[in-house]
Structure formats: C-alpha cells, structure tokens
C-alpha cells in the first residue's frame, strides 16, 4: 500500500481503525470491542484475522495491537501521511477540524465537562496513536462542528441567557460527521451541489438524531447540550420533562442515579424491558410481545414528530434521508415512521423500502410521494479521512 491515511474512532468500549488511500478509498479496517472487560476481542475486518488482547485491555492497548496487526499483515508498510481522530464534543471552540497540538488537546479536555465519557476516551485514543506516530500530522474531527452553523433561534434554550454566556448552556448537536456525509452523498445522487441541497437527515442507531440541513449547512438538530436530548434511542430516553428530576428526587432517586438510568436503562431497552437491538425487538413484536411492539411504535412516532418539526427550518425539502444501523436496515421503522407523515405527503414504495433502495440508488419513495425518500449508508470514516488529508496537505477542510 502506498501513502495512506489512518482513521481512529474510539467509542466507550471499542476502537475502530480504517485505512484510506489518497483518493479516500478504504483499503482496510480493524476493530476492538468489549474493552475494559474480562474478554475483549479484536480482529482485522477484511480478512477476519483475530488479534490477541489481554483481559481488561484499554483503548491504548487495543490501538497498539491493531496497528501492529495491520503492519504484520501488510496493510501498513509505511507510516500514514495523516491520522484522523473522531472527537465527540468540540463545544464552541471548534467550528471545523483542527490539527492536533498541545493547545488543541487542552481545548478538547476543557470540553470534556460537556461530554466527560466521550471526550476523555477520544483524548486517550489521540495520545496513544501520537505515541506510535509522533512525527505524523494528527487531525481532530468533531461531531459537533457541523452544527456550529445553527442560528440562535435553534441553539439557545429558553433559560436565563447568563447560563449560555457563563457556562455554555446551548444546543450543540451531535452525529455531525454523519449528517455532513448525508448531504454530500444525497446531493450527488440528486444531481445537485451540497450548497444547493436541503434535506432532513435521520441518523438512527443505538444513538439517534435528526438534522435539518438547509443549503448544505445544519439549520436545526434534535440532540442538544448532550447526546441525551431528542429522539428515543437504544438505551437513552430522549426528551423528558425536566420536572422529572425533582419528582423522582422525592422518591429517593439521586441525580446520579437518574442520569445513569436515562442514559443506560431507558429508550428501547427501558420501554421493552428486553433489549435495545431493533432487530430483536421486531422479532419479539412479531411473536406477540406487546412491550416490544410498543417500544417500536414510540420510537417511530417520536421520529416522525421530529421530522415534521425539522421542516420549520427549511425553505424546501429535496429528500428525507435514513442512515445508521436502524435507518439503513429496518424497513419496518421506515414504514411506521412515514405512516405518521402521510399528511405531509410522504409515501413509500413497499418493494423499494423492503430492499432499502438497493437497485434505485437509495430511493424508496413511491411515484406519488411529495418528497424523495432515500436510504444512504453511513460513512463517517471517509469524512474524517478527507478532512485529515486536506489539513495535512495545508488545505481548508470542506
């Protein structure tokens, strides 16, 4: 392999690595999962080669092991020309990708109070990879940066303005790397430029968010100060009445306990009492498990309600786009969601929806739909690779 770009994506208990050539075509990938557990596992994704990890391996251990495995199997014969890192929260400091230096690391750490788990892990991944490649340009690409274009009416809460001025309390939004890819790819498929394309992008996985993208830039989004706000998600509640905190305090539940429950025990898991896996929920619902069917119904209704709300930020709608694990692979979710939006003119072709638009460049709408509806595969890694490559070359990231 010639000159390449390495992408590092650290999750709460996982690390994903991807290698791209200078034309931003993926050449190889590797993943480590169940980190900090008794039995972590890792593999090179393309050939399925298992990579040994010790019990309770940390992110830094996994990165070192995966890089060594990619080298050994011939995927990385030389140093990368750049390393791109996904960072969840950039606050208002980062409106675009940034070269990593001491000042960048300090600023990312300062944003950690807004996403303590995510940013701390992202920082550990950056430090671990820099120790392997100390002389290679490293670039931080932020999930929040894409949403820095939000107008004040969309990002300010109805709270005392001093909270924003003094403490940064505002809507930041997340999944920005994915949403930015959606508008670029939707524009290509629609024969438009991103700057002339307006879409509603629904990123649906274990974490879920919707964004209104007007003429290529984010105009509104469902996630807020933290990734907890907005849609019902895998284990996250999404929107709840803030009065819930005071009410449950009278029941003896502390703020810490409630925070844990809303993030890790709610959403599809909490509603179904079974699982946060949409595929498993659909199977359970098909076999008559009513709580699972209800969880799916609530998930789809809340999603439809947010899609409708996002239209207030657009002057036209070129497409509604589904992406992410659920968005790409669940015809049931797409169908049930759009059944709530018939008044707005959305309509699906049942056959196209069932195969995810595989033969129609992602289009799944029927001929009488008022708006195009598309399924587009998520590809955050290529966005990170492109921005890292451009910054390493001294270009302004697009």
Image (cartoon, rainbow, N blue to C red):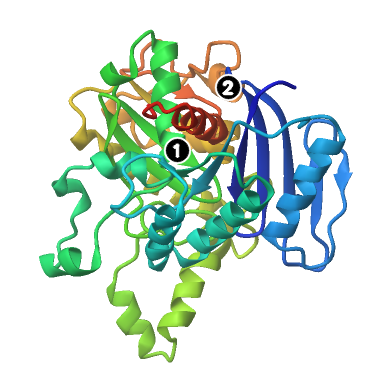
Q: Position of residue 93 (x, y in %)?
A: 30, 52
Residue lying at 40% horizontally and 10% vertically, measured from the top left? 367
Q: Position of residue 163 (x, y in %)?
A: 18, 69
The residue located at (76%, 63%) in the rendering is 57
Q: Which numbered tag is attached to residue 177?
A: 1
Locate residue 174 relative to residue 155 in the image: left or right: right
Name above or below for residue 392 compared with residue 371: below
Residue lying farthest to the left in this orientation: 161
User: To which residue does mark 2 refer?
Assistant: 24
SS at mark 1 in the image: helix
Q: CA distance from mark 2 to mark 1?
A: 15 Å
| Mark 2 nearby-residue class (10 Å; few <14, some 14–19, many ≥20) | some
- Residue in the foreground of this view, choosing between 321 and 130: 130
Residue 276's quadrant in the figure?
A: bottom right
Residue 23 screen position, x and y as percent: 58, 17
Q: Is residue 201 above or below residue 69?
A: above
Dot 1 alpha-carbon crowd within 10 angstroms: few under 14, some 14 to 19, many 20 or more: many
**Residue 189 point in image, percent of width and height:** 44, 12
- Evaluate whether residue 374 shows in this view: yes
The mark nearer the N terminus, 2 or 1, is: 2
Q: Secondary structure at mark 2?
A: loop
Q: Residue 301 or 243: which is nearer the viewer?
A: 243
Is 134 situated left or right of 320 in this image? Answer: right
């Amino acid at each position: 392999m010639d000159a390449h770009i390495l992408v590092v994506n650290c999750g709460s208990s996982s690390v994903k690595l991807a290698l791209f050539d200078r034309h931003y075509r993926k050449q190889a990938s590797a993943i480590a999962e169940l980190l900090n557990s008794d039995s972590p596992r890792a593999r090179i994704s393309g050939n399925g080669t298992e990579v040994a990890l010790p019990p309770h391996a940390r992110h830094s251990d996994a990165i070192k092991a995966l890089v060594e495995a990619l080298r050994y199997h011939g995927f990385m014969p030389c140093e990368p020309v750049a390393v791109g890192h996904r960072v969840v929260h950039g606050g208002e400091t980062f409106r675009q990708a940034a070269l990593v230096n001491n000042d960048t690391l300090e600023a990312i750490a300062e944003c950690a109070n807004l996403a303590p788990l995510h940013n701390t892990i992202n920082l550990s991944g950056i430090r671990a990879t820099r120790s392997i490649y100390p002389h290679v340009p490293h670039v931080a690409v932020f999930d929040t940066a894409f949403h820095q274009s939000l107008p004040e009416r969309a990002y300010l809460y109805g709270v005392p303005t001093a909270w924003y001025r003094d403490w940064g309390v505002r809507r930041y939004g997340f999944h920005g790397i994915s949403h930015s890819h959606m508008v670029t790819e939707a524009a290509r498929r629609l024969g438009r430029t991103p700057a002339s394309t307006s879409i509603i992008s629904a990123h649906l996985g274990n974490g879920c968010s919707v964004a209104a993208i007007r003429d290529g830039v984010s105009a509104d989004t469902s996630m807020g100060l933290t990734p907890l706000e907005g849609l019902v998600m895998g284990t996250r509640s999404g929107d709840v009445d803030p009065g819930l905190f005071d009410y449950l305090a009278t029941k003896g539940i502390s703020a810490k306990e409630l925070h844990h429950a809303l993030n890790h025990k709610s959403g599809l898991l909490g509603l179904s009492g079974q699982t946060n896996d949409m595929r498993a929920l659909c199977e359970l619902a098909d076999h008559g498990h009513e709580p699972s069917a209800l969880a799916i119904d609530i998930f789809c209704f809340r999603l439809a309600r947010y899609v409708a709300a996002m239209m207030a930020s657009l002057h036209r709608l070129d497409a509604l786009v589904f992406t992410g694990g659920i968005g790409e692979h669940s015809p049931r979710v797409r169908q049930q969601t759009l059944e709530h939006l018939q008044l707005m003119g959305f309509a699906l072709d049942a056959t196209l929806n069932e195969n995810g638009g595989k033969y129609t460049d992602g289009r799944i709408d029927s001929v009488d739909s008022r708006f195009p509806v598309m399924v587009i595969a998520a590809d955050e890694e290529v966005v990170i690779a492109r921005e890292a490559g451009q910054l390493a070359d001294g270009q302004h990231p697009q």
